[in-house]
Amino acid sequence: MAIIKKIINWGRIKSPWVLHFNTGACNACDIEIIASLTPRYDLERFGVLLKGTPRHADILLCSGPVTKQVECRLLRIYEQMAEPKFVIAVGSCASSGGVFGCCYNVEGGIDTVIPVSIYIPGCPVNPQALIDGLVKLLASLEGPSPCMKDSKARDDLPIGKP
Amino acid sequence: MLKELFNILVFPGLLFLFIFGMAIEFVDRKLCARLQNRIGPPWYQPLADFIKLLGKEDVVPQESDVAVFKLGPVFALAAAATAFLYIPLWNKQALFSFSGDIIVVFYLLTIPTLVFFLGGWYSRSVFSMIGAVRTLTQFFAYEVPLFMCILSSSLLANTWSLSEMTVFYLAHPWCWLFTLPGFFIALIALLGKLEKVPFDIPEAETEIVAGAFTEYGGRFLAFLRTVLNMEMVVGSSLLAAVFLPFGFVHNAALSFMIFIAKILFITALIAVAHSVVARLRLNQMVSLCWRVFAPLAFLQVLISLVIKGFLVMR
């Protein structure tokens, strides 16, 4: 059984499919995410494919602070993804709320709503930084303590809140 | 009995088709990447994708028809793998053949398309339903030119069996040159069958997330992707057997290499189409198929009839 787990883990490391979701960013981080997927930086080297649907994706790339309006949508998309799933907070706003942290319409960083595996700072993030964060996440899967938040603890999450 | 089982399940059958399909997917993606000046995925990429999808959680939507949702991919896989057995690959004779097997191959090749439609429709998601309807609409457009071109070739050979067609073209070398226009029309129609650019309208990810596959994930998606890879191999070997019937030499290894080269050639053409053309709209695609490719396919039938007349008179 151990060898099967090892093989599946190998597949998981070599084939991370991402879903890009803008939770209220100013579009700068989104442009950088797209830049890292296009020929200049070519994330497909690591097996990354951009997917349109949460059912296919393994990694949720969230950019921007969570606004009150997008909060329930973010939760819904997170719930629609199949296990095992990882969340990357792309940019300063996604990590902590950034300059929008105290706005009346902003909930805060991504981790106020869903568990986050990796935080990538930057305003906006560099494509190099994004690739570095992604590779660090994948490298952590090899080790004993992967950056995998226990999504069973999502009972604490504000699911069903409008 | 044991040998036949081995043939069906392992060598020219299921397992070979599975591995070859993955290799073809890799070649397609790598060529595409190189044409876009990228490095592209490593060689084990399709295998890693498959293993990862097997290890993921299976999500079945509550609203969906569970039986169709779960069994559809298996049916599609079986149909694509069965169609492969009737196509002459590197031998003059296919593994199984009877007079009229060309019709059976056509039928078996339509089953995956139908499964994509049913799976998308019974997922009961708005996007997958739009994708499913697009799959079926596109199906009615490309099917006529594709079948007409392949039938024009069989008309020339005066047989309804793929293996006998190969034998005819070996007896009349260079006859296949007259069906070359049909090859290119059939290749474009095949792009529609495989849902590749410029005819990837059913899974247009910029419009309708992933089309009919929107709700599929985990094992079922792994099967569906395998079906698409297998369809690519089966479709290109069908075109190679019908339109490029040469290179069946006595040396088995050389013959096998020529077969691989033919498939790679067709894959390369598909990859080039992927990187130089953009996606068409559905109405553009349908009108292109009915107004341009269907008359051209008729022309191909006419050419075949004329050549056949010459052959008979001689």
Image (tube, coloured by chain):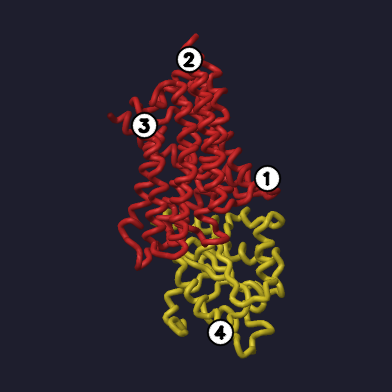
Q: Which mark is residue B7?
A: 3
Q: Give the residue displayed 44% in from the left and 53% down from the top.
A: B222
What is the secondary structure assignment of the residue under circle 3? helix
Q: Colour of chain B?
A: red
Disc 2, SS: helix
Marks 1 and 3, how far apart at CA = 37 Å
Q: Are marks 1 and 4 on the same chain?
A: no
Q: Colour of chain A?
A: yellow
Mark 2 vs 1, N-terminal side: 1
Q: Residue B13: in sight, yes or no?
A: no
| Residues behind callouts 4 and 3 on a single chain | no
> Dot 2 corresponds to which residue?
B171
Element type at mark 1? helix
**Cα–Cα gap, marks 2 and 1:** 39 Å
Q: Amino acid at mark 2?
A: Ala
Residue B205 position in % (x across, y down): 55, 59
Label drawn at residue A68: 4
Respond whether the residues carrying marks 1 and 3 are from the same subunit: yes
Chain ID at mark 4: A
Q: x%, y% of residue A74?
A: 52, 75
Q: CA distance from mark 4 to mark 3?
A: 60 Å
Foreground mark, 2 or 4, reads 2
- Sort mark 4 into few (<14), some (14-19) or many (20+) by Cα contacts within 10 Å: some
Q: Answer with mark 1 or mark 3, whichever residue precedes in sequence.
A: 3
State the residue in front, B278 or B137. B137
